[in-house]
Image: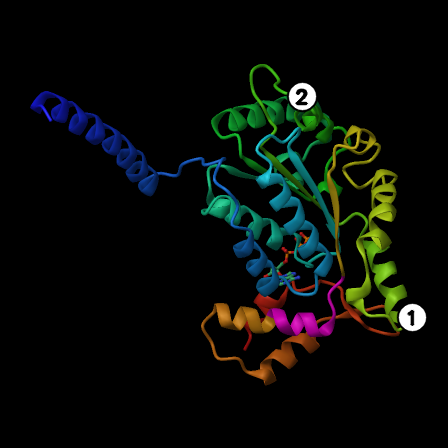
Amino acid sequence: FEPITVGIAIGAASALTGYLSYKDLYCRFAECCRSERPLNASALKQDLEEKLFGQHLATEVILKALTGFKNNKNPKKPLTLSLHGWAGTGKNFVSQIVAENLHPKGLKSNFVHLFVSTLHFPHEQHIKLYQDQLQKWIRGNVSACAGSVFIFDEMDKLHPGVIDAIKPFLDYYEQIDGVSYRKAIFIFLSNAGGDLITKTALDFWRAGRKREDIQLKDLEAVLSVGVFNNKHSGLWHSGLIDRNLIDYFIPFLPLEYRHVKMCVRAEMRARGSAIDEDVVTRVAEEMTFFPKDEKIYSDKGCKTVQSRLDFY
Ligand SMILES: Nc1ncnc2c1ncn2[C@@H]1O[C@H](COP(=O)(O)OP(=O)(O)OP(=O)(O)O)[C@@H](O)[C@H]1O
């Protein structure tokens, strides 16, 4: 080899590795948007199966929806999930798990955005302003990171119409004003439909059938029609349902006594304390259960478990 060629080769290689390691180094200290990074489906599966209690339908659908979407190199629209269920059944919790599996910093990531209706869009007279702000915010963030995640909590408290502002972003457009929204993920959380879900779960229980036998088809249709026609769903007569822009309606079942106990144990483990079954039972028994006669489902799900545990 002549020295000049070798010199050029070494120079090129070091420039290349220098560039690569610079990028890697940069991403080690600053958060990088890695929309193309494949989803670790088995890690997500393990997280859902180990951490989320009593929600076999949500686990199954979320896993299927996310792996399908992330494996598709060329999705035709962003992924839209609508999570429904009673308070404290794990909707926010699951969104956090999903967010962490997409962007390691989870809810703290610059690419994960949480909107809470009563906090961010409180006044009915400002709907127009909220619509403009929302569009700008989403456009800006998707331009910065195609795989951005947007979570809308308390959809049932959102003034009808606000959400329609983002309808164009959720549709099958290749680009809007030079921005493609097809790799983004939108998650809507709502209590709407919780009563329908509970009714179905109760019907199964009363018929002596197992909770795990409830299938998506037992709930999905009821849910989408129920939510569409429910004035307080945030999606009421919304173009999102009209145009089939919601990919999955995901039901969260009401939690039973045994699930509340599982939540107490998980919280104890998270605090690094030894599991004291006596305390587990006492905390679970302090919760209130419905319906009045059978007392099967916790009316706050696992929501107050953490604060109750502070007393012990
Ligand atoms: N199914 C579940 N499995 C494990 N933990 C749960 C589950 N549901 C709730 N929890 C625990 O209870 C806490 C509160 O639940 P979360 O905020 O997810 O409820 P939610 O369904 O979003 O309620 P809301 O509709 O009132 O916002 C969670 O942070 C989690 O610790």
Colouring: rainbow
Image position of 11 (left or right of 192): left
Q: Which label's residue is closer to the chain start, 2 or 1?
A: 2
- Residue at 49 percent across and 47 percent down: it is 106
Is residue 39 something one can see in this rendering? yes
Is residue 261 highlighted in magenta?
A: yes
Looking at the image, how many numbered discs can be counted on the residues?
2
- Residue wearing tag 2: 173
State the separation of the CA atoms marked 2 and 1.
46 Å
Q: Residue furthest left?
A: 3
Q: Is mark 2 within 8 Å of ligand 1?
A: no
Chief SS of the magenta region: helix
227, above or below 140, in the image: below
- Residue at 80 percent across and 53 percent down: it is 216
Residue bounds of the magenta highlight: 254-263
Quadrant where the N terminus sits is: top left
- Residue wearing tag 1: 207
